[in-house]
Amino acid sequence: MAVTETYVDEPWCDRKLDNYIIRAKEPFNAEAKTDMLVDCFVTPTDRHFRRNHGPIPNLDGNMWSMTVEIETSAGRTTRTVGLADLARLRQFEVVAVLECAGNRRDGLKAIKDVNGVTWGAGTASNAQWGGCRLRDVLVAAGVPADLDDAVYATPHHVEFAAYGDATDDDHYASSVPLAWAMNPLNMVLVATTMNGHTLLRDHGFPARIVAPGIIGARWVKWLRRVRVQSRESSSFYQQLDYKILPPAAGATNCAEFWSQFPALMELSVQSAICRPAPGERLCVNRPYVVRGYALSGGGRAVDRVEVSLDDGSTWALADVYTMHTRPGSESDSKSSDHSGVANARDWTAPHWAWVLWAFRIASVPAQCTIASRAWDAGGNTQPDAAVWNYRGVMNNAVFRVNPPTFAGDSRL
């Protein structure tokens, strides 16, 4: 363990604990209560999940700076960048879903023990991020803006390193392919705001990476260094973590597998049922609206969500809502993306945000298994059953709940 700092300076005043299920106190890891996630298309900051790998740095924004390093065959150039420098670059905003690769790890732990925080479905959140493009920071430091430049003919990567200590390495670091970060359509940001306000410490103050469509492990917080290099990050979190190992890999033999498999990047297509909430009882023979979220990676749109009341034997379309529509009550279908051409979406544009969905059960049966699955514009859908892996990552199996029911007054 590399952590040398203590947890005496944690930002407890910024944490509305009633909104969370706390999975670990040190380092602080908490997921949102899922029934609260579907109230708003943009997740309020005090409901956004919090994932940390060590103590939270307490950085002074006025004194903060990061280095931008460019490695080439001729040597290394270094530039120091502060908040004022970032503010002088053109500012952008993007609504993007952030999902931890370990979201729904509990489903894999139910099969066999896994290595990692036991998350439910509450480590996905959808926020409005603001800042400058990473591309513009790199161009100002000397990286060619033209993607046809010879530098892009060979693989390059951009590594992000954080201030502060981490539990499994000297510090947290990760990387993404340079060509992905330099594509202006991918909206990779050096973000300084979240939901219109300065980043909280838990969320990376003063500056963090926002990498839409990519797993949360690459969205590095508390930026200390950005470096363009010819190789992936050598960090623990790139090489010995956040990979899908085969089922043969386990605690005693995983070392032989890490180097054989790639670091995770794009999110998988995913859906989750948020209502009924865990333990919520449904009244038999009465109507009920099932609600949840769905997302996918790489900019692929979720084009539909299907719901089954018979454990997957038959499926029906749910109503899907984007940032331009919102779920209401029983008239939901009038504003959903499956109601006609009025709300037709541009399937060719990158889609970075999640969608919310709703499905009305006209009469709740005495016993039912409610299941959801999403499809994306690439033709991908969720597998019927989860495939176990040692780190318990990327579980996107069909989501199932078996809510308890009770008999209501038939005279109502």
Image (cartoon, rainbow, N blue to C red):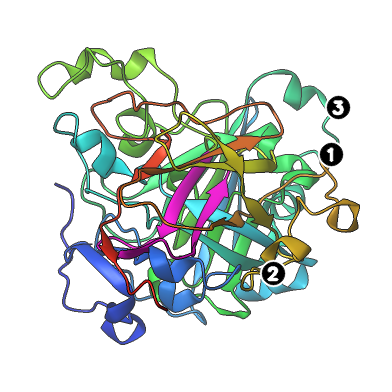
**Which is nearer the N-term, disc 3 or disc 2?**
3
Query: The residue tagged with tag 2: helix, strand or loop?
Result: loop
Is there a contact, CB below 8 Å, between mark 1 and mark 3?
Answer: no
Q: CA distance from mark 1 to mark 3?
A: 23 Å
Residue positioned 30% across, 54% down in the render? 403
Q: Nearer the viewer, mark 3 or mark 2?
A: 2
Q: CA distance from mark 2 to mark 1?
A: 29 Å
Assess disc 2: are there few (<14), some (14-19) or many (≥20) residues with their C-alpha within 10 Å of its C-alpha.
few
Above or below: residue 86 compared with residue 217: below
Magenta residues (range):
270-295
Q: Residue 381's spot in the image, x, y percent?
A: 56, 30
Residue positioned 22% across, 12% down in the render? 248
Left or right, residue 330 beside residue 6: right
Left or right, residue 128 beside residue 172: right
Assess disc 3: are there few (<14), some (14-19) or many (≥20) residues with their C-alpha within 10 Å of its C-alpha.
few
Question: Which amino acid type is marked by label 1?
Answer: Thr
Residue positioned 26% across, 64% down in the render? 406
Residue 53: quarter of image? bottom left
Q: Residue farthest to the front?
A: 411
Question: Which amino acid type is marked by label 3?
Answer: Asp
Q: Residue 90's spot in the image, x, y percent?
A: 80, 66
Please name the residue that numbered disc 1 is placed on.
Answer: 348
Please name the residue that numbered disc 2 is placed on.
Answer: 331
**Which is nearer the N-term, disc 1 or disc 3?**
3
